[in-house]
């Protein structure tokens, strides 16, 4: 039995994707945990930007919302939301947009809007927020999501955030300034777009996970790289940094609730 | 010219049935107390505008105040769904809710366009997004120099903007800091503006480039300490994450929600009384 | 990533003949020292961009560095004409100067559009103004919602922005305050950015919403105390109004101008030496 | 002999036009002197806005430039120049725009761009600056200028800032949000647009000035109101406030030059 959970491994692997000094526009939840773990381990000079307007946030604990006070207090500066979306995101100043996904398809297109029909949804999700423009303006996009046949689907019900469209060079017709998804990190492995077809392909599998498991957790016929890597397990340093961060976070959120 | 009035008077004077109302606040400085007062005064047929409708909009929608919602992200931040918002959209309860949905980039630019006296905002956005297929207010405009097509959305020009701020001085100038969101744009885009504040001071002690709204763009100021709780006011009190989590259970069921709103909002006279009752319940 | 370098190296590395260069500063924090260094290094065929070309642009134009000027107000503030600017436009001396003329509203929006990655800016401007007849870069765009026609100008995207700021920290983050003008927009619209600063500090001690340019949008920082004189740096030194008045006489005649520039700029090694020589002359 | 100069009277009269609590977008030079005199006399709560971004400036001395430090230090707050022109001017937040003029015609159209042909000017003036949009966005426009046949001309060489176009309702075709010039204050008197033709008409004449003088100083056939008022001379309080302001200004600018 490994001494870490699947979620811990997912977060560690996601964190590893972020090089030091990357300017990263961070979604709340899983992306924020991964980006802050990167900052607390191998990427001390990573620049974390949240859509609430905080530039260079260095929170001690993970924010519950995209606009927690900790993000502002620890930031280099805080700008207005219109400025954030105009000068910083659309202005092309973001290296990596880090998104979560409710539904994702084989080309990395993401749905966070509705399950079912838009006008008569069976489940109404929160919507786009900043994601549509993060997906098209950031230099590249990383996605983090727990893998299951319910969320990794053959057809998403609604395209909130453009990935590689219908694959190949089809994204080009939208003239998006950014390059789109380059990796999808899950609790089972990592998927990267095929250089030609842009179809998400399993290129790394987590220790203890079988290819069959990964295929079963995918709503399309998952392609597997010939040279399938096995993910390096979390180091003791990575695990202890993540656990300390999560313990601080739990403590802080319990206190604040009093 | 600013009038210093009670919150009840500010709402009674400036918000009417059928108005479009933007109660803004991006996680920080959410005008909760003002929203409660709108519920107490039973406003109807409002068009509610907000980038991030959260608990207070969930309450307004669940209590039947809203006819339409213009928004770009509707969730309980860090927790999950807004159940009243979902119930209105998915099942039309307590009444059908028309909605116009955008992304943050578009809505932020639409407020800025409203503040700038422009009829529309152009943005490099909505590329490949299905939203444009469902929202007729997402159109396009051609750059007269490059021929590029950009997305365009209509300017937001609410009848009333409502925000919560940290401070006002006695002349009625308002200061906010920390995460300032789109509050300045919302106020300047709106015809009227109501501001609730943590405190009223002699001197704002603001830095040279602080986010200050001069008294002459504010219609009414009401002194409502803790008026943004359970969200937070930077420098005054922290976010009550626990309440956001509790709201999930309170709001999930229609009857539980209605009973809670009756007991805590309708049957309390003001925000101070509300907070006391909620605090007691949390500690019980 | 910011490099801390000498001003001479910053100019040598980042400004090339034929570049479009925006040295911005709205009366405050004008990058005089950087402009002198461009003159010393004899750059040619520059397209100079600035809302308010003043003394330093007068000098650059008179010394033959500029091929074209994009501007919205060209005068010696509070004094009168810029004689070298006028001589170039009226008589083509020392060489013809192409120019593209705007109003402030348009130019400010054009920088903001450049910073926002948009190809153009729309504004409610130029109504009834003859400028639109003479500047083919003033066009119009139709609102896709109301059908109104608005003025449109192309975004400004300079090759290089040059600004003077009060402080940088050792990581290369830059702080400006007071009249901040369009400096942030100019830097974010530009491909490269050079910043001269009054001082380099451990901690910017900036307020939560201060105008800070992060190190990763700045190409080079040079420490040049008093680098904005005779304009001013809020919190450091006052505007030398006397020099602005003296410039009128220095610049009125071509030979006087050339002699003055040779003695004070070309024959000095850097801005410190220049300032010492000018101060001595003023006190003589 | 009066105990005041023509320029002093002009500034005093211009100041009187500004009601307390007016939000005034102030041009540099004569408008700034008048607006600050108003603030120091009958209009203590006037809001002075300068295009450099200062809102609510209360300078002790007159600025030489539109962006003097004194304007920022004494302001309620200072915004960026793009914000100033977008949110405050085009946003319709200005009651009165107060402009100077190099050339003005009978309908209050103003030229501050060129004398002569635009492409081959005999005199190149500074240009529009903020004036074009002040002229069309402010609720109303006041103009202050020394009157002479050279500046009050039959045809201006270039329309920098729209007045009442060709008179009558012709301004309407530009759909300007603001109402245009409502008064022109000179060293000889005050001109206001005729309610119907919008032609600038001499409605008040300064003490000691003859109608013939005013006509001679006007490049078009100047119309004179039937009920021509005579301007009230400066009061002792007005004069002493103005002279104290100018003395402080001269002292400050001399000191700063050292």
Image (cartoon, coloured by chain):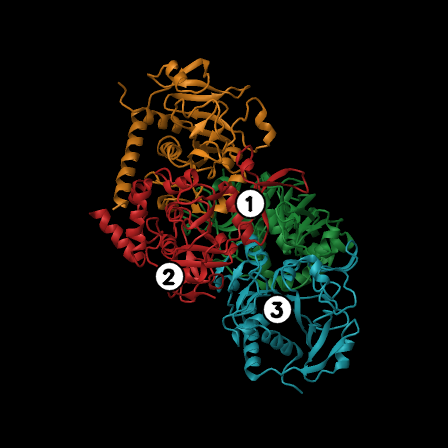
Chain colours: A orange, B red, C green, D cyan
Q: Position of residue C152 (x, y in %)?
A: 66, 48
Q: Which element is circle 3 on? A: helix
* Left or right: where B83 falls relative to D116: left
Q: Chain of mark 3?
A: D
**Marks 3 and 1, how far apart at CA:** 32 Å
Q: Nearer the viewer, residue D224 or D244?
A: D224
* Residue at position x 48%, y 66% in the image: B1
> Which residue occupies the foreground of this view, A254 or C242?
A254
Q: Residues within 10 Å of mark 2 (few under 14, many from 20)?
A: some
Question: How far from the left and from the top, in percent, is residue B53?
Answer: 42, 45
In this rendering, the label closer to the viewer, 3 or 2: 2
In this picture, residue C172 sits left or right of residue D52:
left
Which residue is pictured at 60% across the width and 77% down the height?
Answer: D12
Distance, label 3 to label 2, CA atoms, is 43 Å
**Subunit that carries the residue with mark 2:** B
In-front residue for pair C60/A210: A210
Viewer can see residue C8? no
Figure quadrant of the C terminus of chain C? bottom right
**Residue occupied by mark 1:** C187
- Tell me where residue D149 sits by quadrant: bottom right
Q: Residue at x 68, y 56 (%)?
A: C127
- Reading the image, the residue beneath label 3 is D31
| Residue D216: x %, y % from top left | 78, 77
Image quarter of residue D10:
bottom right
In this view of the protein, can residue C39 be seen by the observer? yes
- The part of the image, by quadrant, that contains residue C251 is bottom right
Residue that carries the numbered disc 2 in the rendered image? B8
């Amino acid at each position: 039995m490994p001494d870490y959970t699947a979620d811990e491994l997912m977060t560690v692997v996601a964190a590893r994707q972020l090089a030091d000094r990357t300017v990263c526009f961070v979604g709340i939840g899983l992306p924020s945990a991964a980006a802050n773990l990167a900052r607390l381990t191998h990427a001390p000079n990573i620049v974390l930007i949240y859509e609430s307007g905080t530039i260079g946030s260095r929170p001690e604990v993970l924010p519950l919302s995209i606009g927690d006070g900790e993000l502002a207090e620890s930031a280099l500066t805080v700008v207005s939301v219109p400025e954030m979306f105009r000068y910083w995101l659309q202005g092309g100043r973001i290296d990596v947009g880090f998104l979560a996904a409710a539904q994702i398809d084989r080309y990395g297109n993401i749905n966070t809007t509705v399950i079912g029909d838009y006008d008569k949804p069976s489940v109404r999700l929160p919507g786009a927020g900043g994601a549509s423009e993060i997906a098209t303006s950031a230099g590249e996009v990383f996605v983090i999501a727990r893998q299951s046949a319910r969320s990794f689907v053959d057809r998403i019900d609604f395209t909130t955030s453009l990935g590689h469209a219908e694959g190949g060079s089809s994204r080009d017709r939208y003239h998006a300034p950014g390059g789109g998804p380059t990796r999808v990190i899950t609790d089972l492995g990592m998927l990267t777009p095929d250089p030609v077809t842009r179809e998400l392909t399993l290129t790394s599998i987590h220790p203890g996970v079988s290819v069959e498991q990964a295929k079963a957790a995918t709503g399309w016929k998952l392609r597997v790289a010939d040279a399938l890597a096995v993910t390096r397990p979390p180091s003791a340093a990575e695990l202890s940094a993540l656990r300390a961060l999560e313990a601080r976070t739990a403590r802080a959120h319990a206190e604040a609730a009093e | 010219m600013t009038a210093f009035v009670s919150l009840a008077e500010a709402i009674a004077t400036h918000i009417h049935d059928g108005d479009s109302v933007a109660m803004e606040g991006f996680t920080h400085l959410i005008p909760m107390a003002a929203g409660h007062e709108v519920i107490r005064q039973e406003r109807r047929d409002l068009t509610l505008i907000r980038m991030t409708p959260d608990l207070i909009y969930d309450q307004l929608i669940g209590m039947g105040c809203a006819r339409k919602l213009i928004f770009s992200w509707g969730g309980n931040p860090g927790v999950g769904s807004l159940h009243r918002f979902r119930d209105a959209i998915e099942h039309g309860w307590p009444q059908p809710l028309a909605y116009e949905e955008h992304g943050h980039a578009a809505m932020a630019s639409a407020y800025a366009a409203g503040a700038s006296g422009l009829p529309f905002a152009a943005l490099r956005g909505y590329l490949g997004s299905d939203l444009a297929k469902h929202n007729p207010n997402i159109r396009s405009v051609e750059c007269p120099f490059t021929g590029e097509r950009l997305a365009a959305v209509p300017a937001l020009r609410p009848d009333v903007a409502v925000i919560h701020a940290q401070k006002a001085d006695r002349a009625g100038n308002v200061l906010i800091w920390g995460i300032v969101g789109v509050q300045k744009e919302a106020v300047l885009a709106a015809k009227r503006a109501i501001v609730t504040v943590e405190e009223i001071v002699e001197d704002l002690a603001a830095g040279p480039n602080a986010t200050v709204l001069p008294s002459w763009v504010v219609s009414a100021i009401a002194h409502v300490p803790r008026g943004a709780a359970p969200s937070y006011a930077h420098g005054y009190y922290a976010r009550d994450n626990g309440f956001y989590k509790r709201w999930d259970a309170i709001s999930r069921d229609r009857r539980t929600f209605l009973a809670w709103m009756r007991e805590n909002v309708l049957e309390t006279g003001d925000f101070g009384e509300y907070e006391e009752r909620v605090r007691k319940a949390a500690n019980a």
